[in-house]
Amino acid sequence: MFKSLIAAALLGLAATTAHAQTASLTIVCDNLKPQGKVMIAIYDSQEGYAGDKAVRFAAAEVTGSQATVSVDGLAEGDYALKMFHDVDGDGKMGMNPFGMPTEPFAFSNNARGTMGPATWAAARFTVTAPVTTQTIAF
């Protein structure tokens, strides 16, 4: 009897896992100079966002005033984005001697930070299947 209960529980868990939905996230970046790349870090928790521990990264070449990136296979849930326009193409956010960014940057929900990045609460959005879109103005 005990083995039957374990087998039933494992089958139920397998069925739940098999039906877990994944979603796609489309990120549309506006107001760009037609050069370089947009570099995007994707976070799935407040702790990861605060600790700069992204769960995924994405990038897109910028050839016009708008760039679009699609990220597939995300679990449904809450996310936030930190991104910058790598105008000079060196793969790093340009900073002045005082540590202030010299390249355009943005956050999901078009959130704004004060003396640092936007907060998780301001940048957080929910990804649901099949597709969620974030449009970000730089």
Image: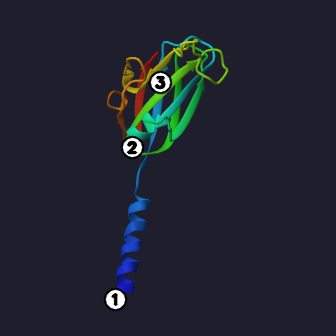
Say which residue label 1 marks.
1
Kind of element beneath mark 2: loop
Outermost residue toward the front? 98
Labelled pair 3, 1 in contact (Cβ < 8 Å): no
Of the residues shown, which amino acid type is indicated by label 1? Met
Q: CA distance from mark 2 to mark 1?
A: 39 Å
Give me the disc on residue 28.
3
Figure quadrant of residue 77? top left
Indicate which disc, 3 or 1, sits on the residue closer to the N terminus: 1
The picture places residue 33, in percent across and down from the top left corner, at 57, 10
The secondary element bearing badge 1 is classed as loop
Q: Amino acid at mark 3?
A: Val
Residue to which mark 2 is pinned = 129
- Residue displayed at 64% across by 24% down: 91
Viewer-nearest of labels 3 and 1? 1
In the rendered image, which quarter contains the N terminus? bottom left
Which dot, 2 or 1, sits closer to the camera?
1
Q: Position of residue 86 (x, y in %)?
A: 60, 19
